[in-house]
Amino acid sequence: MGSTHDGQHGERGTLPAGLPPNAVARRQDGVILVVPGEPGDLAALDRDGNPEFYDREGAHLGTIDISGINEDPTTCALFAISNLSRVRGAVYLIAWYLTRHTAAKTFVVRRVNSQRLQRLLERLGMRLAAGGRDMVGSSAAVHDLARKKCHRHRWQLMGAPPL
């Protein structure tokens, strides 16, 4: 179910020309990241599907599989994150997107079992919580570091001021 220009779902690879309203990032080579629902609706990530990558011709490049989004006044957490594409920087993009649209002071990725994911999250200032596999960080710090990492990967972030 690829996102289409009007925000509805269609077949993968049918993204029309132009930038859809639910595109939240664009790379220099024209690759875009499209989120389900309206930008900023974090519940849509659990309810409506996963963020998806498309090339400049509209071909589907894969998804960022995330699940278990939970947001309350103090914590924005997710249970799982997997980059199911060959697009680099997916973890940084999702961390930027989630921390940009939450008012919660703490950002958590639960049950981090992959050493690679742990290293990526550590680069965003996140640390293992005592006695567990959860990675925890300040939403503001994670947002700032993720934004910088996205820019290094040549992503233009919609609604974010340039560095």
Image: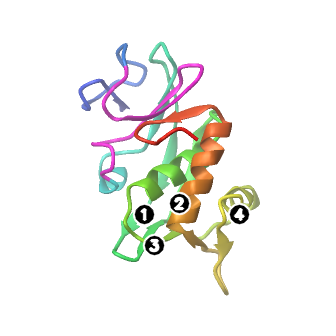
Tell me, for residue 68, which label it has, or none: 1
Between residue 126 and residue 44, name the one nearer to us: 126
The residue carrying mark 3 is 105
Between residue 72 and residue 139, name the one nearer to us: 139
Of marks 1 and 3, the one in the foreground: 3
Marks 2 & 4, CB-CB < 8 Å contact: no
Using the numbered discs, state the Cα–Cα distance from disc 1 to disc 4 in whole angstroms. 21 Å
The residue carrying mark 2 is 80
Using the numbered discs, state the Cα–Cα distance from disc 3 to disc 2 in whole angstroms. 20 Å
**Residue 34, x across and y down, in percent:** 41, 35
Within 10 Å of disc 1 (Cα), the crowding (few <14, some 14-19, many 20+) is some
In the rendered image, the vertical position of residue 94 relative to residue 14, given as above or below: below
Q: Is residue 160 left or right of residue 115?
A: left
Between residue 84 and residue 137, name the one nearer to us: 137
Is residue 100 on the magenta stretch? no
Dot 4: what SS? helix
The residue carrying mark 4 is 122
Q: Residue furthest bottom?
A: 131
**Residue 105, x across and y down, in percent:** 45, 72
In the rendered image, the vertical position of residue 160 relative to residue 108, given as above or below: above
Dot 3: what SS? loop
Of marks 2 and 4, the one in the foreground: 4
* Sequence-wise first label, 4 or 3: 3
Using the numbered discs, state the Cα–Cα distance from disc 1 to disc 2 in whole angstroms. 7 Å
Between residue 72 and residue 14, name the one nearer to us: 72
Using the numbered discs, state the Cα–Cα distance from disc 4 to disc 3 in whole angstroms. 17 Å
